[in-house]
Each structure stands twice: as C-alpha cells, then as structure tokens.
Amino acid sequence: MSDLIQLSNGQARPKAPRVEDLELKFSEQAVRQLDALRGHYPEAKACILPALWIAQREYGGWLPPEAIAEVAHRLGHSYAEVEGVATFYTMYNTDHPVGRHMIEVCTCLTCHMCGAYKIATYLQQKLGIGFGETTADGMFTLHEVECLDACDRAPVLQIGDEYVGPVDEARIDAILEELRKREDASVVKLADEIVRVHLMAGENN
Amino acid sequence: MAEKKLLLEHAHDPAYQTLAGYRAKGGYKALEKALSVDRQAIIDEVKASGLRGRGGAGFPTWIKWNGLPKEKTKPHYVVCNADEGEPGTFKDKQLMEETPFLLVEGMTLAGYATRSEVGYIYVRGEFLDAARACRKAIDEAYAAGLLGKNIMGKGFDYDLHIHTGAGSYECGEESALMSSLMGERGMPRLKFPHAPLPTVAGLWDLPTLINNVETYCCTPSIVDRGGEWYATMGASTKNSRGTKIFSVSGHVNKPGNYEIEFGTPLMELLEMAGGMKGGELKACVPGGSSVPIINKESCEKAILGYEEMGDVGSMVGSGGCIFLNDQTCIVSFIWRTSKFYAEESCGKCTPCREGTRWMEKVLERIVRGNGQPGDKQLLLDICSQIDGRSFCGLGDAAAWPVAGAIKVFPEEFDYFIEHGHSIVGSQMMREINPAFIKSGRTAKV
Ligand SMILES: Cc1cc2nc3c(=O)[nH]c(=O)nc-3n(C[C@H](O)[C@H](O)[C@H](O)COP(=O)(O)O)c2cc1C
Ligand code: SF4
Ligand code: FES
C-alpha cells in the first residue's frame, strides 16, 4: 500500500506510486480481455473505462493507486488522466478498500416517497455503520445512491450485480444473513460481470 | 383507451429473448426487407412514421438518420443511449432485459440506413441484467450471421459492441455519453450551433447517430409494416405518433411499465397502474424528475402527447411518471430532487455546479425547519439564473422541477418556511434522520 497524503479536510488519500515501483498485477486472463477490448474501438483511450472495471476486479473490488497506475501504464496514458476518469464515476471505488458486499440504498425520489430513509436507518443501525463506511469485519460497505431506475420496486437496493426490491426490514435481515454465508465477494462479481458483458462469446476467456 | 402493446407485446415471454423465438414472432423481417431496398427508403419510412426520440427531447428521429453523410468518406457510428438515469424511468431497462432483439435489430437497421460499420450500446453500469440480455442477443445474432460480416449475405458489415458506464447520470446527456465512450470524464461537449452536430462530428469527430433504446426498438415495426401504418397511432394528438412506454411509480397499486397510444389521458394511465395507494391523488411528475410537477386538476386534463403535455405546463420527457398521494410533502420531494441534481452535476459550468448546490442547501434548511422568509424567492432567483444559462441540459433540468413546484404549490413552501414543519402531517420527514440530509457518496476527496 502506498504512502498517504494528508488533506486539509482531515482525510487522507494514497499517493500515486512511482512507475519504477509498479508491480503489474493483472492476471493472464485480464491481459487477454484487455487485448480483446482494444479491438472494439479505434483508439486505445476508449478502453479506459472497461480497463478500470478489469482493474477493480483484479484488485479485489476497489482501485488503489497501483490499479490506476497499472491501467495507465497498460494503455499508455498518464496517471493523472486515468485517475481523473476513475474519480468521476461513482461505481469505481477509489477512496478506500470496500467490504466484500457493497449495499447501495437508493434514497432518490420514488424510493424516498416509499420509505427509503427508514430502510437506510435500519441498515445503519443493524450494521453499525454510516454511509461510506465498512464494517470492522470487512463484510459490508454501505452507500446511498441516486435513482437506480427500478422505481417500480421502490425502495430498492443494489448489491453487487443484483437489484433487490422492494425491501422491508424483514427482507433486509434475510438478505444480510444470505450475504454473510456467501462464498464470493459481490463487489468483485460485479466488476467481473461488467467486464464480461463487454466481451463477445469468443473473447471471454 | 387501454394499453396498446407494440414493443411490449411479447415482453414477458422468455422465448422472445432467443433468436428463434424472436423470429417466430416476425423478428428480422424488417432487416431482411431493408437490406434489399435503398437506404433512403428506410429513412423515408421513419419520416412517414412521425417517430420522435424517446430519450426525453422528442426530436424527430428521421432528421438524425438523414443527417449522416450520404457519400461515405470515413467511418460512421451508431450509438444507443441506454444510460437510463432519469429518476422515475425504467422502460429502457425492461426493453433491454425482455426484448433485446428489438434493440439489436433496430440498431442494425439504423447502421444500414446511415452507412455505419460499428454500433455501441452505452448501458449504465448498474444495469447488469439488461447488459447481459443484450450480450446474449448480440452473441446469438453474430452466430446466425445477423451481425458481423456480410449480414444476411447482402454485403453489409456491421459490428455491435456493449460499453458500460460506471455511475453518472450526466452520461445520459448525449455529448457527455460520447466523452465517456471515448474514455474520458463524462462531461458534455460544445454543441450546435457552436460546434457541428454529432451526425457530422460525433464519436472521434466522425459522423454519429445517437438515439435512445426505445427509439431504436420502434424502428423494426416501422420498417416492416410501414411508416404510414405507424402514424395512424396517436393521430388524435397534434404531433405525437405511435406508442410510448410510461414507467409508472410512486403511490400506485401496480407500479410498472405501461405502453399506451399517444393521445391517452393521463388519468387512464393511472387507472392501468391500479389507481392510487395510501391516499388521494395530489400531484404527478409525468415525464421523469426533470419535468415540472402538476397538480390533480392538471392531471385530470392532461393528455399524453408531446404538445398536449405542454398545455398543462409539463412534458412527456422520458416517460417516468411518478404519482404522489395526498400524504406527500411536496417540499421534501423537491428537496430530494434538488439533491439528485446537485449530486449529479458534472461540475463543468458555474451556474449548474454552484446553483444546484445552492438550491439543495436552501431546500435543506427549509426541510430542517430553518427556512428564512425570503427563501422561496431566493429559490426562484437561483432557478432563473441556472435555466438557459448552463452548458448542458442538466442545469435546466435541475431548475424546472423546483420552479415548477413553487409555482404549483406555493402555499406548501410558505407554510414550511413559516412553521418549520410540513403542511402535510405526514410521517415522511420524521423518518429522515437529520444526519442523512447532508450526506452522499460522491463526497470524494
Ligand atoms: C442531463 C441529461 C440526461 C439525459 N439522460 C438521458 C438518458 O438517460 N437516456 C436517453 O436516452 N437520453 C437522455 N438524455 C437525452 C439525450 O441527450 C438525447 O437527447 C437522446 O439520447 C437522444 O435520443 P432520442 O432522439 O432517441 O431521444 C439526457 C439529456 C440530458 C440533458
Ligand atoms: S449544466 Fe454544466 S455543470 Fe451541469 S451537468 Fe451540464 S455541463 Fe455539467
Ligand atoms: S428512486 Fe429508487 S430506483 Fe428510482
């Protein structure tokens, strides 16, 4: 893990690694997938978003500075450029490692009208964490999100590559139990599934 | 009038998600027909159909299709805007999940008509089920020679790729979407008349067609059955033809997507969705969070059509129809709306970046019971400074709902500001832990 830079607002963020310190971590599969993706666009730069998804999977569900540096290196772009892209989008986790399962509560219009904040309070109490925080056992990260565009199922949650809704307190208890037993990390599954939908039948190996 | 299912006719049938099932219901007849006629004939059918873009703005589709160069000197692209992010809307999601071949065939038709060789479906990162369904359909179409080289043996080559977003409403704005597809931050680009139209210089500065999912899904039946036939639907309206899917949510008994013919009264849509739940109808946001809210009286007069909705002071927009019952605190609803826009503003231009946050702040202090006497006017002032002065449509879309709500429900704002609590004695605000009001995941460093 790289050094931290202390920020004026009291938070800290990891420092970009130096190129000579960079240890490439992409698996062979990841390298093959990235190569296949290059064929989809006339310019390699267009691979930045999908490559960040590959990196988020390879680095265990988030993008430490090393992951951003690796994407930049592999695509021949600057660290700053790739970091700029990664930090723009909310689904790339660039700030800190996340739990195995990220629970994202939609509190937007319709969900708010259908009691989403009650659900959010329940989740916070049950997990003992606030939005943006991760449980001490590294199991869950909780987030508030904007409309997931499944308002017919309000109030709705996104967990990994799935939507769950409408939810109530009982359903949440059951979901948390299931997630605790689950073997894989849904944050990694999400990134992997996103990579897969980019690739054609023959390219997905 | 009842539902009129054109796109959603076979939506619940899993077989329709397979190529064989799709073909059994007449799928790919349009493409077969198209590949043996002149390209202009397809564009003429789309013109005759009166089809207007279903992504929100209602722009005539044929003008875009006709706008790409007819003499081909460089690559052309087709893009599908599947970034559906407008709160209240979930029609593109269902179309992709349940009728993916309609989209694939529609985009192939568009590719042929515009002399393009590659299409991209830009789908929001959260929509995994939709993206997976499209992936399956695309793979099947390739295997059957309906994508790739020499489609149907007619010498037309066309590739179709999926590209996902990663969480950003702004990427639904077409020029921001193209930035995102090219690997950049999802910020919009300079637009016509200050820059060429995307049909002249879009993706990689090359001619690009961009339409919404539903727009493409309409085209196979237009090409197959003819534009004139399509235009018979909605003929009672001024200038809205065909069917439109409305995503109904909020306080209704049967939320979901309902496809209707243009010209259907809004109240019938409410009836289809099982009527109100938990109280009487109070208000409706008929076309996604960006359009002005209307009260019960306007709902009763409203006819679903682009111009007709304008008559009651709102818009068809993306078709995200949120019905609100009489327990709803409009101020709280609008506070959450403004929070959405403040979160999603891309930050490129000052009126929107600062204005959306300012509005959120003012509304936040009102819902916390600390409203100041001049706050209503202040909000209207901020709205007028954002509206029409922002770089892209997000700014306008952030201002309209706030200004609209103040116009239609001024007494609710006055009451909340004066008394420090809602005119509606509802639970809604009490459910909100004050700590939540200032929160949000995008507080990135
Ligand atoms: C802030 C903003 C968000 C938008 N989001 C979407 C969207 O999610 N889906 C969409 O199809 N159009 C969206 N649009 C409209 C597009 O810019 C564009 O008009 C549309 O893709 C054109 O397709 P159409 O002609 O088929 O409607 C959005 C516009 C703005 C200003
Ligand atoms: S109006 Fe300006 S700040 Fe707002 S989203 Fe558009 S470009 Fe970005
Ligand atoms: S408001 Fe929650 S899914 Fe749309």
Image (cartoon, coloured by chain):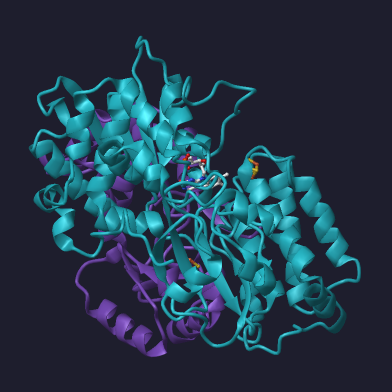
Report the residue at 57% width, 49% height from top: B306
Report the residue at 75% width, 67% height from top: B408
Task: Compare residues B260 and A183 and report the one nearer the observer.
Answer: B260
- In the rendered image of this protein, which colour is used for chain A? purple
User: What x and y, as percent, mark residue A89?
Assistant: 47, 49
Report the residue at 32% width, 24% height from top: B41
A107 displayed left or right of A38? right
User: What x and y, as percent, mark residue A183?
Assistant: 19, 71
Q: Is residue A33 above or below residue B338?
A: above
Task: Compare residues B211 and B333 and report the one nearer the observer.
Answer: B211
Q: Tell me, yes or no, if residue A198 can be seen here.
A: yes
Figure quadrant of residue A101: bottom left
Residue extending furthest toward the right: B373
B407 displayed left or right of B285? right
Report the residue at 44% width, 66% height from top: B1
B243 displayed left or right of B326? left
Task: Compare residues A14 and B277 and report the one nearer the observer.
Answer: B277
- In the rendered image of this protein, which colour is used for chain B? cyan
**What is the tally of numbered marks visible in this picture?**
0
Q: Tell me, yes or no, if residue A79 can be seen here.
A: no
User: What x and y, as percent, mark residue B198?
Assistant: 49, 26
User: What x and y, as percent, mark residue B95?
Assistant: 32, 55
